Amino acid sequence: MLHVSGSRLVTHDNTPVRLRGVGLGGWMNMENFITGYPANESSMRYAVRGVLGEERAELFFDRLLTSFFTEQDAALLAGLGMNCVRIPVNYHHWEADDRPFEIDRRGFHHLDRVIGLLGEHGIYSVIDLHALPGSQNQHWHSDNPTHVAAFWQHRHFQDRAVHLWEVIADHYRENPWVAGYNPANEPGDVTGKVIGPFYDRLVKAVRAADPDHILFLDGNTYATDFSIFREMYENTVFVMHDYALAGFAHGGPYPGYTRGEWCDRGELERTFTKRSRFQRETGTPMWVGEFGPVYTGDPDVDAQRYQILRDQLEIYDGQEVGWSLWTYKDVGLQGLVHASGPYLERFGDFIAKKRRLGADRWGSTMEESADILAPVHAMVETEFPSWEPYPWGARYQTDDLIRHILIAQALLPEYAELFRGLGDDELLALADSFRLEQCARRGPLLDLLAGNLGGVAPS
């Protein structure tokens, strides 16, 4: 079983291991830009159930979990040279909000299956609780239908998270292919006063259930602020995220300016040095839990995005930093591979409409429908010049409230209606569009990663 030794991860015989791989986003924690739906996962599932009914909705969603990751996917990642997959999960797989603390052990079915497949190919898993009860951050990826991270406001939600982690840790306590547990993805505690005591309590509870596995703890403010840690826990990695501003959907040229900020290789390295200062000062391992640019389909722009990734990997290699690239599979924005076939035929026009409206934060350039939103931004700047809401300021908050919540939620009925009238075989075909055999492969990205990792890109 892996454990922390100084600034490295090592095996039982003290052989160093640098975990390098990919995040399995959109699988057991679905995200809007990854599978093409609007708003947040729970709202989407509710809308789809309203059209299909409980049983047929379950037929589709369970088949999607089965098809999204199979033995062929594990083999592809191993062939590239990867040795780690970070697996985001949503608490709803184990617990319903109307039955708190009642654990549904069916939640382990697919997770056990994929951890087993990865282990057979020599790949470690990091279990990442991406969505906690009450939502631990302000955005869609914590399954948050609002902009309020209620997790930090209610002890009830924290109690449920601790209880769930006791169950997960007990379940995997003897599994050597689980590298460890990432208990809260990108926490956003506005005050910064709750998260430290919560981590103290969580670490104690998890250690009681499983004293051996590594803990991967994200810093506050979306894994960027480590001032909240009051002590150095044993056998722990303090996880940073390292997205490059120029690599976002609204990113500018590289090298060049994005919203007034210069970005080149030197700036990438300076930013990483700043973000990893806590790990250096404490002599703990450096592991980037998420990073990676998004792609546009424009060959010239995408060539710059590949250069961003190439530069980041060189920086990490020079300092023996582990990493987990975001993300493995989607509908075309960021993945190593992306779905095609019946799903894109059915939902392609809808996904294009979402893109036109900028209804997904991760895919938005922040310029869509500018003629409509520009007066709102101007009014906010004029009337509330000192307003700097957590976490990213007024411009981002305004877009989140109007574009990524209001407009996104208004799109939910339209998405759900696209399921109406489909037979069972058609539902299964939609889900099977995410099987690797039906996916398109982002060749330049696969070549880049294989070259870095010493693996072989699939033909």
Image (cartoon, helix red, strand yellow):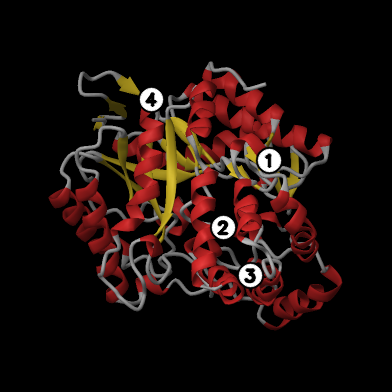
Q: Nearer the viewer, residue 263 or 220?
A: 220
- Identity of the amino acid at label 1? Cys
Query: Which residue is at the far right?
Result: 371
Residue 422 quadrant: bottom right
Determine whether the residue tagged by mark 2 lies in a helix, strand or loop.
loop
Vertical order, 377 against 94 (above or below): below
- Which residue was labeled with disc 2? 31
Residue neighbourhood size for the residue with mark 3, other residues' Cα within 10 Å, grouped as few (<14), some (14–19), many (≥20): many
Q: Are marks 2 and 3 in contact (CB under 8 Å)?
A: no
**Which is nearer the N-term, disc 1 or disc 2?**
2
**Which is nearer the N-term, disc 4 or disc 2?**
2
- Identity of the amino acid at label 3? Asp
Residue 353 quadrant: bottom right
- Which residue was labeled with disc 4? 122
**Which is nearer the N-term, disc 1 or disc 3?**
1
Q: Report the disc number at residue 400.
A: 3
**Which is nearer the N-term, disc 4 or disc 3?**
4
Q: Nearer the viewer, mark 1 or mark 4?
A: 4
Q: Nearer the viewer, mark 2 or mark 3?
A: 2
- Which residue was labeled with disc 1? 263
Q: Are marks 4 and 2 in contact (CB under 8 Å)?
A: no
- Identity of the amino acid at label 4? Gly
